[in-house]
Image: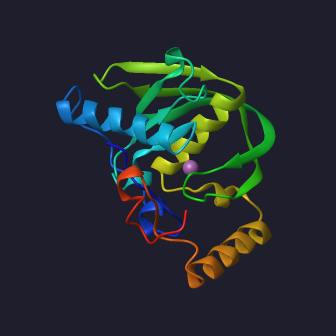
Amino acid sequence: MIYDVIRYPDPRLETPCDPVEEFDTAELKQLVADMFDTMYYHKGVGLAAPQIGVMKQIAVLDVSLGEDPGQKIVIINPKIARQEGRIREEEGCLCFPGFREKITRAARVVVAAKDVSGMEIRIEAGDLLSRALQHEIDHLNGILFIRHMSALKRDLIRRKIRKMIKAGEWGPVVPGPKREESSVVKA
Ligand code: NI
């Protein structure tokens, strides 16, 4: 199933998620499969569970955008164990369609997490994967990418979105395929 993606300023996006306690269940496996389908449909390199309204510490990533199955990553209850360097690059978020800004992040990270079966995993990453991991782990802690911007940039984006909401150009979700025909939301 492909989910709608919640748009800012839904308060769930700024709420920290609960850790997963039960692993290897049919529900968890189905949710992860649905999160990959949703991420590919919306053309993201990462998707965190709160972006579809599931308040659990689960994220999926694939910086190959579905080109290379070996790049599929699931992180559950993740922590950044190490980080080094700084790098400033453009970044977007599925909850802010149309907005991209330069964000400073750690250049390289080591992430400690669990996989779907509850096994401990460690991921060492640089480049786009490092950025995507930091972005998704932020989501699980209720931190949006606008929090990494200057107050000026952040307020500008908030004002633009408020205007679009008033004009009916920014709905509560970016709809998945099942809603497209009937939806009144402009995407
Ligand atoms: Ni995001």
* Residue at screen point 39% across, 39% down: 35
Q: Residue furthest top?
A: 70
Left or right: 113 as drawn, with respect to 9? left
Residue most extreme to the bottom: 166
Which one is in front, 4 or 10?
Answer: 4
If the image is split into quadrants, where does the C terminus sit? Answer: bottom right
- Indicate how the structure is coloured in the image: rainbow
Residue at horizontal 56%, vertical 41%? 43
Location of residue 148 (image quadrant)? bottom right
Q: Quadrant of residue 99?
A: bottom right
**Tally of numbered tags:** 0
Q: Is residue 148 above or below residue 82?
A: below
Judge whether residue 144 can be spotted in this image. Answer: yes
Q: Is residue 152 shown above or below 54? A: below
Residue shown at 64%/54% (left/top)? 145
Task: Tell me residue 39's x, y (percent).
Answer: 48, 40
Q: Is residue 184 above or below residue 50?
A: below
Q: In the rendered image, which quarter contains the N terminus?
A: top left
Q: Nearer the viewer, residue 21 or 31?
A: 31
Q: Residue 77, percent across and down? A: 39, 36
Q: Nearer the viewer, residue 132 or 63?
A: 63
Location of residue 104 in the rendering, given as x and y in whole percent from the top left corner: 76, 46
Q: Is residue 161 above or below residue 23?
A: below
Horizontal and vertical percent for residue 134? 60, 39
Task: Specify whether residue 83 is in view.
Answer: no
Q: In the current view of this chain or complex, which residue is farthest to the left? A: 26
Residue at the location (69% across, 25% down)? 126
Classify residue 159 as left or right of residue 17: right
